[in-house]
């Protein structure tokens, strides 16, 4: 298959963010081991930002990149109009 | 993501709602299962259609997430204590080792895969030996571009070495060293090396998939 780089970024970043959140939640459950400050200011925002980045990366994977998705986001004009 | 934002709100305002944490765990696992199922459910790609695909996704996600958590803990001034640093290293080594086992099993399985259909089975001619002389078109098409990675075998085998060392072996060795010598600064380095190997691993996952249609787009003329 043709590996699409947006897919590579999407799956790796999302997997990492999910792992982060999984372990934060587990550590919180088994002993409240993580202080709220750390969670509030570093860990959880990091996780949310990572998930957001992976979501944006997944947009570049949808549809026909040469027709719809990427030119739409980047604002280029399409080549020619099909009648 | 919404659940994570809610948890962030709770921790900023110092509330504690203990229901959010199991929800986050379940949602993480669900998202892993969903993203892995996208590839695992394609029956025609034998490399992917195996439960190990999902296991590999989840294991790698857990491992990179744990290394990320360890790195973030090290950046935070007052949470890190000696016992938890050991926990970061040891659990990291364990997770990496599990991922390595899974990956080697997948590679071994992929090496022994054979296509389930042949030219004979495609056109139903059993007795005669068939050779394809042309794929019917001279230029490229969607089928000739989309389903092949267009890299040489050397690139692939080099990438496999990068994956083996970068994503698994070097992080394991560095973590063992870090656990012995308590060098905190190694953990972000381990995360970076592991992430580069992870990206290569994911690229290889997509590239090594062999769609049966590749059997038929072999020769121009």
Image (tube, coloured by chain):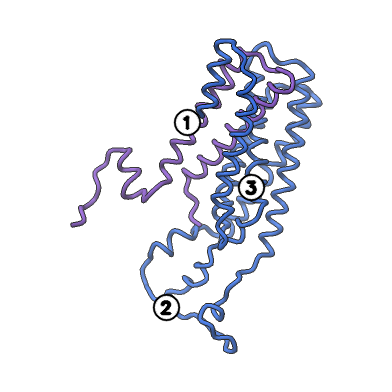
Chain colours: A purple, B blue
The image shows residue B208, relative to residue B174, as above or below, that is: below
Residue at label 2? B221
Mark 1 and mark 3 in contact (Cβ < 8 Å)? Answer: no
User: Which chain contains the residue that carries disc 1?
Assistant: A
Q: CA distance from mark 1 to mark 2?
A: 47 Å
Residue at label 3? B54
Q: Nearer the viewer, mark 1 or mark 2?
A: 1
* Element class at badge 2: loop
The image shows residue A58, relative to residue B137, as above or below, that is: above
Dividing the picture into quadrants, the one containing residue B183 is: top right
Q: Is residue B69 left or right of residue A48?
A: right
Image quarter in which the C terminus of chain B is found: bottom left
Residue B63: x %, y % from top left = 67, 36
Q: Are marks 1 and 2 on the same chain?
A: no
Residue B219: x %, y % from top left = 46, 74
**Residue at horizontal 66 percent and vertical 19 percent from the top:** B74
User: Which chain contains the residue that carries disc 2?
Assistant: B
């Amino acid at each position: 298959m043709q590996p699409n780089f947006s897919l590579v970024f999407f799956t790796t970043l999302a997997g990492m963010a999910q792992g982060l959140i999984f372990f934060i939640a587990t550590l919180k459950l088994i002993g409240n081991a993580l202080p709220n400050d750390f969670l509030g200011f570093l860990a959880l925002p990091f996780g949310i930002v990572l998930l957001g980045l992976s979501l944006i990366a997944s947009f570049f994977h949808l549809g026909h990149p040469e027709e719809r998705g990427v030119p739409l986001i980047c604002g280029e004009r399409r080549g020619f109009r099909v009648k | 993501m919404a659940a994570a934002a809610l948890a962030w709100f709770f921790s900023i305002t110092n509330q504690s709602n203990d229901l959010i944490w199991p929800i986050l765990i379940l949602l993480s696992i669900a998202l892993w299962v969903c993203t892995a199922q996208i590839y695992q459910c394609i029956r025609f790609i034998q490399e992917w259609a195996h439960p190990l695909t999902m296991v590999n996704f989840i294991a790698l996600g857990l491992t990179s997430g744990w290394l990320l958590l360890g790195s973030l803990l090290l950046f935070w001034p007052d949470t890190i204590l000696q016992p938890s640093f050991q926990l970061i290293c040891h659990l990291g080594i364990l997770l990496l080792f599990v991922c390595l086992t899974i990956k080697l099993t997948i590679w071994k399985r992929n090496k022994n895969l054979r296509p389930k259909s042949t030219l004979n089975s495609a056109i139903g001619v059993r007795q005669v030996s068939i050779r394809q002389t042309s794929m019917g078109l001279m230029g490229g098409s969607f089928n000739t571009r989309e389903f092949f990675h267009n890299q040489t075998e050397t690139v692939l085998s080099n990438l496999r070495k990068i994956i083996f060392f970068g994503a698994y072996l070097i992080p394991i060795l560095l973590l063992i060293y870090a656990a012995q010598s308590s060098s905190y600064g190694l953990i972000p380095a381990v995360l970076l090396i592991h992430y580069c190997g992870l990206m290569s691993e994911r690229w290889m996952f997509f590239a090594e998939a062999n769609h049966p249609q590749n059997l038929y787009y072999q020769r121009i003329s």
